[in-house]
Amino acid sequence: VLGLAVATQPAWADRAARDLDRVLCDHAHCEMKAASNALALSARCTPWPSVMRALLDLAEEELAHFRRVLCEIERRGLALGPPEEDYYAAELRRRASAGRRDRSIAAVVTDRLLVGALIEARSCERFKLLSASIRPVDADLAAFYAELFEAEARHHAALTELAGVVTPDAGLVRARLADLARVEAEIVRALPGGATIHG
Ligand SMILES: [Fe+2]
Ligand SMILES: [Fe+2]
């Protein structure tokens, strides 16, 4: 799916479906982080005004997702606690930055856009799995995850396209995305498969 080099193990969705309270709380934090990452990155995109605006739009949409997940959490009588550690995203960022030779602002921003695109792709893949596995027990929540699955697929495409604005060399962007997708796959293969969006 969406340029991902390895598929999530089906057992992940079963585990997630059995612990939806934890998944929802973790998911809320993922949306909040997606919004704040997009906002922080937009501030570094002043040399590319169209990219800056697109990231502002993305931040607003992710914030709207956060509010909707928060509503679902409250509807279930749950309280949102502090974020759990997201090893997956942190490790992907760390390895992207460790493996980057070009330290220019364009290269840094391009990498952050591509890392974001991969995180969107993985979330998209997992929302689809989760939606299918909870459909028999909670059709409304399944529909919500199906809707988000479409949004994250769109974000994946948008972030990849924005990387091409910052780095107009399409071959270079494609090669870097393939490198990062290989790193992402290595990280995903080693995940314990717990009941979090990136578990
Ligand atoms: Fe989102
Ligand atoms: Fe997203």
Image: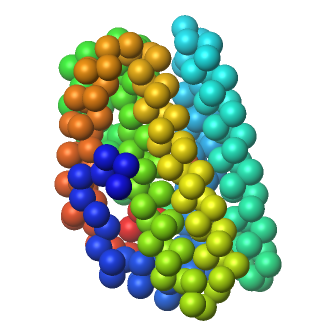
User: Going by the picture, which residue comes out furthest to the bottom?
Assistant: 137
Quadrant of res 139: bottom right
Q: Is residue 17 left or right of residue 114?
A: right
Based on the displayed image, in which of its 4 quarters is residue 30 positioned?
bottom right
Q: How many marks?
A: 0
Its colouring scheme is rainbow
Instruction: Tell me where residue 42 appears, x and y as whole percent.
Output: 60, 25
Residue 112 location (% of width, % of height): 42, 31
Q: Note whether 8 is above or below 107 in the view shown.
A: below
Side (left or right) of 29 relative to 7: right
Q: Residue at x 33, y 81 (%)?
A: 11
At 42% from the left and 51% from the top, the residue drawn is 121
Residue 83 in sight from this viewpoint: no
Q: Is residue 37 visible?
A: yes
Is 112 drawn above or below residue 152 in the view shown?
above
Percent coordinates x, y for residue 164 in the rendering: 41, 21
